[in-house]
Amino acid sequence: MVSVSSGGARTLSVRNHDRDLAGLTYVYPVLSRRAGGVSVGINLNPNNACNWHCVYCQVPDLVRGKAPAIDLARLETELRGFLDDLVHGDWMQRFVPEGARAIRDIAFSGNGEPTSAVEFPQAVGLVLRLREEFGLAGAGKAAAAVPLRLITNGSLMTQARVQDGIRRLGEAGGEVWFKIDGGTAAAIERINGVHLDPEAVVRHLACCTALCTTWVQTCMFRWDGEAPSAADIDAYLDVLARGRSAGLAGVLLYGVARQSMQPEAARITPLTADELEGIGERIKEKGLTVRVSP
């Protein structure tokens, strides 16, 4: 059994998403403000490699690349040990603030794009099996199922193995949180560090919504002191409107709550809660559900 440590932390915090908190390679806990409790993170990018470079990313020493080969046996050992401590041990009492001691999800979200792992669909199957093993799948008289989520930039949606993994998520009642931060090629390049046509974003989003319940996840902030322009918001809303027609569940809109670890960090400052709520109202006008987390 892999030993689960506290990493020296007294309690989890929404401002501390340290992937080393539990002392494991692939599994880490966070207190998620959007999920509203403990999220059991699955990090398939322990090499800090991602095919995007988002300016607000909290991953230190981020590099361009993809996930390394995944040791599925180690992933299983780590996740089984950690779930055992959460479900049968006292980890919650030791490290989670009172009022937040609930497992809200198991999420593929780590130090890079999780779907870049060749073993992504196998990892999904493994997590689903362990969720069942620990009584977290909501069967019989048990409590509601702990959802399985994928947090992704959606860039690899055309690959068959990625679609296979997302299809497994969908069949198990899971969700995808699909990153869209801008509606123009210029905004996407500035925020996410990639050359990407918004039309491709729409196509990838439509593919994802056909396979699994999908929410758009959006981070908005001030850039060099300036809030997103009216034109930028309009272009973003246009992408969302086309996503709505494809069956999009809604939008998770949030601001910056933790320090970026990227060179652009000094250029990023938070929007006010009222500014984010105002953008949220614009999204609602498109007929979409929206959850705002300042």
Image (cartoon, rainbow, N blue to C red):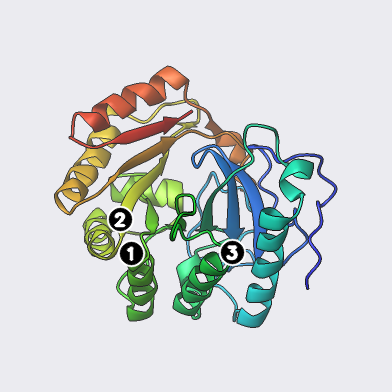
Look at the numbered discs 1 and 2 and tell me whether their residues touch, using CB distance below 8 Å: yes
Q: Check contact, mark 2 vs mark 3: CB within 8 A.
A: no
Where does residue 251 sit, x and y in percent of width and height? 33, 41
Alpha carbons under labels 1 and 2: distance apart: 6 Å
Q: Residue at x 57, y 41 (%)?
A: 37
* Residue linked to disc 2: 213
Please tell me which residue lies in front, 225 or 89.
89
The residue type indicated by label 1 comes to Gly
The Cα–Cα distance between marks 1 and 3, rounded to whole angstroms, is: 20 Å
Q: Which residue is mark 1?
A: 170
Q: Earlier in the sequence, mark 1 or mark 3?
A: 3
Marks 2 and 3, how far apart in space?
24 Å
Say which label, 1 or 2, has the lower sequence index: 1
Question: Which numbered mark, 2 or 3, is in the foreground of this view?
Answer: 3
Residue 28, given in percent of the width and then of the height, sits at 67, 57
- What residue is at 19 percent from the left and 52 percent from the top? 247
What amino acid is at disc 3?
Phe
Q: Quadrant of residue 74?
A: bottom right
Q: Secondary structure at mark 2?
A: strand
Tag of residue 35? none
The residue that disc 3 covers is 134
Quadrant of the frame with the N terminus: bottom right
Q: Which class describes the residues within 10 Å of circle 2: few (<14), some (14-19), or many (20+)?
A: many
Q: Looking at the picture, which amino acid does disc 2 mark?
A: Thr
Residue 210 position within the rendered picture, expressed as x and y whole percent measured from the top left:
22, 63
From the viewer's perspective, is residue 83 above or below residue 18?
Answer: below
